[in-house]
């Protein structure tokens, strides 16, 4: 029998090590291969993806570092989608890249994205046994490698045709959770129409993630595939303004709300409304995308100046500082500075390790334990300075928490002024209140965050309406949104099948 079809089997407590060549002991001594990437001096001159991707020989060597732990493998448990990672890596090791991609696609709607954007160091790779010997197996880059290989050579695999159910579903939003729902439901024979407020589909993946992390051709290839299998996209349509949930109810058998948590937090200090102070989303979309992809109010580059400040320290703030630095270098401000101010310590930054390392390589400066108290403008109402205050950080002393949270305490008399001709606010996101305000029967747990019976089903408080992802959990990971969308799709399919 073909050993690929047998290995690794979850029913086995310990796979037969005779299948492993090299042996487990030999595998842990294979040195990790850093994935190829652009040099910092070169990547600042473009918006191309930093990681250029493994070639086939590099991918095979890296995949061979997997020691195929006894079931259930820690990496599978560490993945919110529970991808069969060992089996996929074994396929790569054998040169079966298409098979590897198909294994990932059994449980993930977008391995090209998860392989690039998941914080693997706290998920699958954070659970990897090999990390006890050397660097964890680079699961994310291998996932992206095989998915890219399959897509570039033969396209996305087409699902088997199934009889049409004559059931119609409206999906609101076209981000990760919505893409998962749309794909899962159309594959089950339902008619799916997606409503998107932006000019192009893709939601967060197209508009929120910079090109140097995720090429837009990858996102649009997925959209084209969804259209090919029957999903219809209606863009420039904001549900809650242009059409109401109640209107959708009259046209569709079920509705999925996947609008995410798109509203940037206000900082609520003097000067927030000065010219030159941007919310992160506006700065990112104007800095990363062509005008044709944007609504009229956001067309054109943001201001590009010599002194740029970013407030916050998470994934979005790192996207902002790296975008800002590229804009400086590519627009005659190579001698400019981008400074990220954060009220906490470096160890408290909630961002991918790779992205933080790349930001530092690209010349981003960080000022920790510093918090703004006001923005100072000139006579024309344009920001020119920030008054900051030093902070100290200490645990909240809540022993029941696995990772105790910290509080930041202002230090009296520590104020100081810093120059800034552009300020970007990247201090987190919250839900959009528009739809709940127009459909009061949709209950929320906090503004813009929908109440559901269970995250296992996504059943909202109006019959036939479901929600999942960031508009239920609050701002979270792409992979958790995909996982939640898949669960909601299963519940919606069951609901649709029971309709008379």
Image: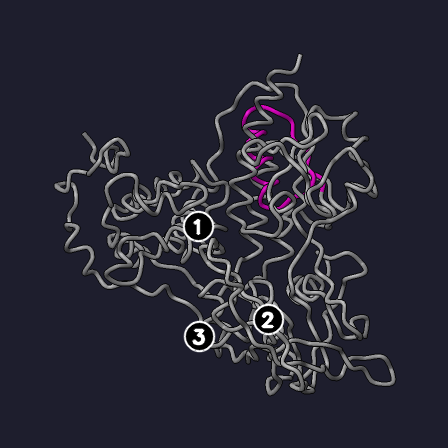
- Crowding at dot 2, Cα within 10 Å, few <14 / some 14-19 / many 20+, comes out as some
Q: Is residue 275 above or below residue 226?
A: below
Quarter that holds the C terminus:
top right
From the top left corner, tell me how far across and down residue 174 is, in percent: 65, 44
Looking at the picture, how far across and down is residue 309, in whole percent? 65, 77
Q: Earlier in the sequence, mark 2 or mark 3?
A: 3
- Magenta stretch in the rendered image: 172-195
Residue hosting label 1: 148
Question: Residue 454 appears at what percent x and percent y?
Answer: 58, 33
Q: Circle 3 sits in a helix, a strand or a loop, which is it?
A: loop
Q: Nearer the viewer, mark 2 or mark 1?
A: 2
Q: Name the residue tied to disc 3.
A: 39
The numbered mark at residue 408 is 2
Q: Secondary structure at mark 1?
A: helix
Return the x and y of residue 45 as percentages of the image width and height.
55, 75
Answer with left or right where residue 328 lies relative to residue 398. right
């Amino acid at each position: 029998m073909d050993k690929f079809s047998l290995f690794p089997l979850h029913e086995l407590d310990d796979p037969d090590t005779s299948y492993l060549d090299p042996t487990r002991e030999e595998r842990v001594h294979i040195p990790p291969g850093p994935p190829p990437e652009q040099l910092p001096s070169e990547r600042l001159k473009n918006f191309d993806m930093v990681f250029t991707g493994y070639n086939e020989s590099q991918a095979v060597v890296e995949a061979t570092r997997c020691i195929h732990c006894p079931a259930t493998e820690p990496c599978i448990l560490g993945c919110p989608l529970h991808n069969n990672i060992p089996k996929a890596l074994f396929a790569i090791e054998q040169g079966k890249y298409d098979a590897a991609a198909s294994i990932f696609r059994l449980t993930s709607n977008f391995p090209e994205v998860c392989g690039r954007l998941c914080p693997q160091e706290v998920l699958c790779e954070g659970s990897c046994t090999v990390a006890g010997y050397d660097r964890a197996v680079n699961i994310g880059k291998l996932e992206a490698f095989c998915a890219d290989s399959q897509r570039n050579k033969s396209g996305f695999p087409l699902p088997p045709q199934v009889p049409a159910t004559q059931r119609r579903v409206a999906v609101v939003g076209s981000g990760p959770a919505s893409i998962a729902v749309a794909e899962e439901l159309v594959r089950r024979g339902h008619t799916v129409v997606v409503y998107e407020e932006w000019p192009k589909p893709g939601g967060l993946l197209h508009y929120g993630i910079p090109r140097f992390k995720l090429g837009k051709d990858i996102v649009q290839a997925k959209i084209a595939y969804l259209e090919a299998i029957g999903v219809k996209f209606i863009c420039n349509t904001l549900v809650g303004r242009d059409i109401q949930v109640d209107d959708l109810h009259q046209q569709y058998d079920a509705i999925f709300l996947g609008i995410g948590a798109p509203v940037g937090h206000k900082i609520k200090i003097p000067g927030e409304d000065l010219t030159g102070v941007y919310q992160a989303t506006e700065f990112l979309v104007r800095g990363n995308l062509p005008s044709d992809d944007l609504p009229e109010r956001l067309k054109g580059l943001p201001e590009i100046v010599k002194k740029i400040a970013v407030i916050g320290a998470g994934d979005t703030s790192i996207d902002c500082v790296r975008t800002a630095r590229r804009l400086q270098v590519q627009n005659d401000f190579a001698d400019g500075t981008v400074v990220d101010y954060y009220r906490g310590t470096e160890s408290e930054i909630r961002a991918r390790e790779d992205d933080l390392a790349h930001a530092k390589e690209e010349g981003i400066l960080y000022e920790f334990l510093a918090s703004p108290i006001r923005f100072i403008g000139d006579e024309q109402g344009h920001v020119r300075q920030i008054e900051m205050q030093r902070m100290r950080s200490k645990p909240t002393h809540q022993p029941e928490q696995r990772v105790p949270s910290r509080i930041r305490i202002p230090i009296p008399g520590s104020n100081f002024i810093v120059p800034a001709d552009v300020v970007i606010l990247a201090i987190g996101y919250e839900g959009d209140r528009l739809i709940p305000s127009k459909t009061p029967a949709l209950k929320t747990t906090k503004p813009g965050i929908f109440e559901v019976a269970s995250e296992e089903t996504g059943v909202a408080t109006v019959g036939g309406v479901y929600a999942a992802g960031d508009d239920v959990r609050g701002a979270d990971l792409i992979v958790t949104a995909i996982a939640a969308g898949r669960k909601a799709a299963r519940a919606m399919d069951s609901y649709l099948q029971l309709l008379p």
